[in-house]
Amino acid sequence: MTTSTQAERGVIAITGASGAVGGRVARRLAKQGYPLRLVVRDESRAPHLPDAAVAVASDYTDHPAMVAALAGVSTMLLVSAHEGGDRVQVHKSAVAAAVEAGVKRIAYLSFLNAAPDATFILARDHFYTEQAIRATGLDFVFLRSSLYADGTPGFFGKDGVVRGPAGDGRISLVSRDDIADVAAAVLTDASYTGQIINNTGPEALSFTEIAAILSDVSARPCRYHEETMDEARQSRAIYGAPPEIVESWISTYTAAKAGELSLISDDVRRITGHAPLSFRDVLTRYPESYAHLLEGSDPR
């Protein structure tokens, strides 16, 4: 981006900096020489990067630790917390800490088509988090991302089958690399303030097509098996998760069936200047994403 649109070179906080997305963003910004505050739960897992200070908070609800971690920060990337019944309140705690610490701008890693009535249950949490951020009056940008392409092989069981009530619904799978590229650009460019950015891949695939591509790249036969809602609940009962979590897992498939995950956006190309990776590209780049299919592993 041109220097006229560059955000002030203040400290940027990356929450979840030891994770797959936060770590990617942190490494990209460190290469560009931005001063960083890496907010993590476990200091030993924080990436070692130049011009990066590490701050520890046990979780987003540890208010004193979060306020201290965000002191002196101008812009924060808020990576969403783990799924759970109190997820919105957890996010609100992080937002409140940002306000108290004097953060000026929040970039929030949200989800595609976040809405109060979204079929994908967790997308509702993202909508209410967005609303909480808006209510602060702080500058914001929302990064609404589709399902992770590099996480999708984990939906397949050790038998090479992905099961769910998705019908022929399509999903515009996006890579974590592309999300990180977009986030790094947005965090350092004030011109994106107030925007809702849709991070998607270049194509919308059905689970049948996803299975076919995975089969081709991995040389491991894979397929999609359509389930009824009752079958979906029964097949996931073995994990012993609370019913509301099971329903959120299943809603990934029903959201696809409802057409809520099929949006194809040009935002990745518009912001980064390069085309987003396809699902096949991601599998080729990250063969470890499907290694469990060759060894045997259970999905959710």
Image: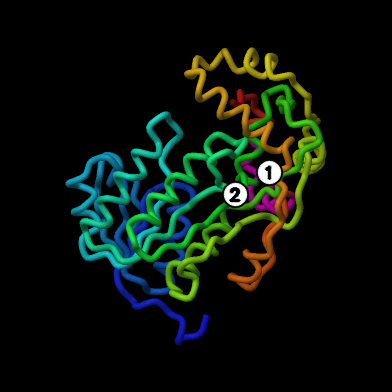
Q: Are marks 1 and 2 in contact (CB under 8 Å)?
A: yes
Residue 89 image offset from top left, x and y in percent: 34, 38
Q: Which residue is mark 1?
A: 260
The kind of residue on which mark 1 rests is Glu
Residue 165 image offset from top left, x and y in percent: 73, 26
Label number found at residue 227: none
Q: Is residue 149 magenta?
A: no
Q: Is residue 184 left or right of residue 36?
A: right
On-image quarter of the C terminus: top right
Label 1: how many residues lie within 10 Å, few (<14), some (14-19) or many (20+)? many
Q: Secondary structure at mark 1?
A: loop
Residue 232 image offset from top left, x and y in percent: 67, 19
- What range of the chain is rendered magenta? 280-291
Q: Main secondary structure of the magenta part?
A: helix
Q: Residue at x 36, y 52 (%)?
A: 15
Q: In 3D space, how far apart are the residues under numbered discs 1 and 2 (Cα atoms)? A: 8 Å
Count of numbered tags: 2
Q: Secondary structure at mark 2?
A: loop
Marked residue nearer the N-terminal end (1 or 2): 2
Asked if residue 70 is positioned above or below residue 18 in the image, the reply reads below
Residue 107 image offset from top left, x and y in percent: 43, 60
Q: Is residue 161 left or right of residue 88?
A: right
Q: Which residue is mark 2?
A: 112
Q: Residue at x 60, y 49 (%)?
A: 112
Q: Is residue 285 magenta?
A: yes
Give the quadrant of residue 205.
Answer: top right
